[in-house]
Image (cartoon, helix red, strand yellow):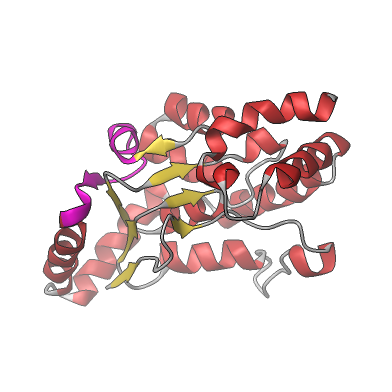
Amino acid sequence: MVVFESAVPDFFLAHYDIGAPPSRSAPPSRPAGMPSWLDVLARIANGPFVSIAKIRGRARGAGSEFALACDMRFASREHAVLSQPEIGLGLVAGGAPTHYLPFLTGRGRALEIMLTGQDYDADLAERYGYVNRAVPDAGLDGFVADIAGRIASFDKAALVEVKNFVGEVSLPAHDLQTATSRAFWVSAARPASRQRLTAAREQGLGRPGDFEMRMGQHLPGLDQATDS
């Protein structure tokens, strides 16, 4: 039983940073042929353990992808924010949320999340199936501890077998995930995407401040910034 949480106020896990030089930023492939980030997600999703994401703060882009790879997600009603903002930067999400989300939310809502790049608070994320439950922040720790303790009290072999059977019909194949990673790096090289990323960095992408706190509201304005 593994519970993932963040000690950083306002953020569960931030988005992927592609501002570094390509030699440092582009993830290498693992021996199985999956890029490193997808390998991490696959190990969580397919591992012989039960994983819970306890979300306080923002889980955007790679942070959202990490949460989606976990078996369950419980979010602070007051403090959790989830999104896949890549579309606003001219990017294709590379950690396969396009393949994880439809099973959880349905096709229409998955497309809404992916094509609008909006921020989703915990209550709306719960309604959509993006997270299992939205829980008042004061009770989140106790709630997750109770869930984790209950699951951990059961037979591990049975838990793993149930997880594997559910995964057979709900997790994307490795080759489908790898295709999203390739699309991400191709999209990141497009001139229009580079312009949007430059505009976003000028407005505060990757730095503490209002852009990171309210990214969903800032993304539409990048179109105007690239035209000026």
Asked which quadrant contains residue 82, the reply is top left
Q: Residue 137, percent across and down?
A: 22, 52
Asked which quadrant contains residue 31, the reply is bottom right
Tell me if 159 is positioned left or right of 180 in this view. Answer: left
Tell me if 202 is positioned left or right of 118 in this view. Answer: right
Tell me if 3 is positioned left or right of 85 in this view. Answer: left
As drawn, 60 above or below 3: above
Nearer to us in this view, 152 or 118 = 118
Outermost residue to the right: 191
Tell me if 212 is positioned left or right of 179 in this view. Answer: left
Q: Residue 16, percent across and down?
A: 63, 56
As drawn, 97 above or below 166: above
The residue range painted magenta reads 122-138
Number of callouts in the render? 0
Residue 98: in magenta span: no
Residue depicted at 64% across the width and 34% down the height: 87
Outermost residue to the front: 209
Q: In what quadrant of the picture does the C terminus appear?
A: top right
Q: In what quadrant of the picture does the N terminus appear?
A: bottom left
Q: Residue 149, percent across and down?
A: 14, 71
Nearer to us in this view, 52 or 219 = 219
As drawn, 15 above or below 98: below
Residue 136: in magenta span: yes
Q: Residue 139, percent across and down?
A: 15, 56
Residue depicted at 67% across the width and 27% down the height: 221
Residue depicted at 70% across the width and 40% down the height: 91
